[in-house]
Image: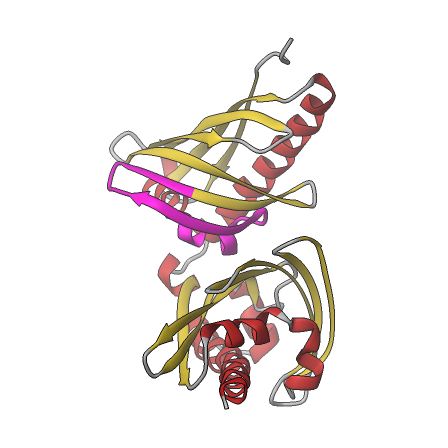
């Protein structure tokens, strides 16, 4: 006999207008830098009122993935979702986001779930995960929406591209083998890479910036051989609330094209502490573009040189 269906509802009053909150939830491409559990999103279908996407997320410390359908109703400030095929221990999962305007420019955000587990033993574990993730997601949504800055100034993306002789497969191997980076990249001092599940990497890395400062980062990476590697930083630098990115590899008649893309969520409160008194969010954007772009180009050039050497 299947476990009984369960229903949960989590709510939070946020000091931000409903349309801003709706827009943040509606754009799933930003989820990896806004919501702590989200790692990567891949759209399968995308329309104004409905969409399908595959989502990879951390659930209880484990990376799970599933495909969801969503119905988006901006006029009603409502987004309904349903997993098409859930991953154990979840048997089925769906729910709805609701955004209700309140006086004073505030909004009540309600996140409802209905779900079943594969067995009774798993039901409580799923309930605890839903409760924990829902609480974290609502708090993260409030942190972004309540800032006195436009969302596009806080959450944005940029990319760099390198073209070189060689194949996408060889450039992919260079990035996929992050455990070899201390011998291949000058800004990387140490890498501890664990891959218990094929294609899912947990990486701890010590790097050095251009000014000589050392940083330790922890990331989870998803490897889609031979064309894409995506990652999410689990402990981003102090100036960021979130950081995710990707490396894309493409064979062309002239060689390989490798593109590194970053998406970041700036923490405005940390900007003066990190960059100095009087510095602004715009200064932070320029700083991040330069610092992250510099390391990306080092990795891109390394991948290109590796691919070119394999060809010769």
What segment carries the magenta color?
A: 27-53
Between residue 227 and residue 263, name the one nearer to us. 227
Between residue 275 and residue 97, name the one nearer to us. 97
Q: Please determine whether, in this image, residue 15 is positioned above or below residue 171.
A: above
Between residue 23 and residue 255, name the one nearer to us. 255
Between residue 252 and residue 68, name the one nearer to us. 252
Give the image location of residue 217, x and y in percent.
Answer: 67, 68
The quarter of the picture where the N terminus appears is: top right
Quarter-of-image position of residue 167: bottom left
Residue 189 in the figure: left or right of residue 172: right
Q: Does residue 242 appear in the picture of this structure? A: no
Q: Is residue 216 magenta?
A: no
Q: Is residue 34 magenta?
A: yes
Give the image location of residue 179, x and y in percent.
Answer: 70, 72
Q: Please determine whether, in this image, residue 234 is positioned above or below residue 283.
A: above
Q: Residue at x 49, y 84 (%)?
A: 304
Q: Please determine whether, in this image, residue 32 is positioned above or below residue 228.
A: above
Q: Residue at x 57, y 69 (%)?
A: 239
Give the image location of residue 282, x and y in percent.
Answer: 41, 74
Q: Residue at x 49, y 31 (%)?
A: 85
């Amino acid at each position: 006999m299947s476990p009984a269906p369960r229903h949960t509802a989590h709510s939070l009053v946020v000091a931000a207008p409903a349309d801003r909150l709706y827009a943040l939830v509606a754009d799933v491409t930003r989820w990896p830098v806004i919501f702590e559990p989200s790692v990567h999103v891949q759209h399968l279908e995308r329309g104004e009122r409905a969409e399908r996407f595959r989502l990879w997320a951390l659930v209880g410390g484990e990376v799970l993935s599933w495909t969801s359908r969503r119905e988006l109703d901006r006029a009603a400030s409502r987004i309904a979702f349903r997993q098409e095929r859930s991953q154990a221990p979840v048997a089925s999962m769906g729910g709805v986001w609701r955004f209700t305007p309140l006086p004073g420019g505030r909004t009540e955000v309600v996140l409802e779930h209905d779900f079943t587990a594969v067995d009774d033993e798993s039901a409580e574990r799923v309930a605890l995960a839903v409760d924990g993730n829902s609480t974290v997601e609502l708090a993260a949504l409030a942190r972004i929406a309540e800032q006195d800055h436009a969302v596009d100034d806080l959450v944005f993306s940029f990319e760099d591209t390198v073209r070189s002789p060689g194949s996408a497969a060889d450039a992919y191997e260079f990035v996929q083998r992050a455990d070899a980076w201390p011998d291949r990249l000058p800004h990387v001092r140490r890498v501890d890479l664990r891959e218990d599940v094929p294609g899912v990497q947990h990486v701890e890395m010590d790097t050095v910036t251009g000014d000589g400062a050392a940083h330790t980062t922890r990331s989870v990476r998803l490897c889609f051989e031979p064309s894409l590697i995506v990652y999410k930083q689990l402990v981003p630098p102090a100036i960021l609330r979130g950081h995710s990115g990707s490396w894309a590899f493409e064979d062309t008649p002239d060689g390989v094209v490798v593109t590194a893309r970053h998406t970041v969520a700036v923490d405005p409160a940390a900007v003066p502490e990190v960059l100095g008194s009087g510095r602004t969010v715009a200064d932070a954007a320029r700083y991040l573009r330069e610092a992250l772009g510099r390391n990306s180009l080092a990795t891109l050039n390394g991948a290109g040189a590796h691919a070119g050497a394999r060809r010769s």
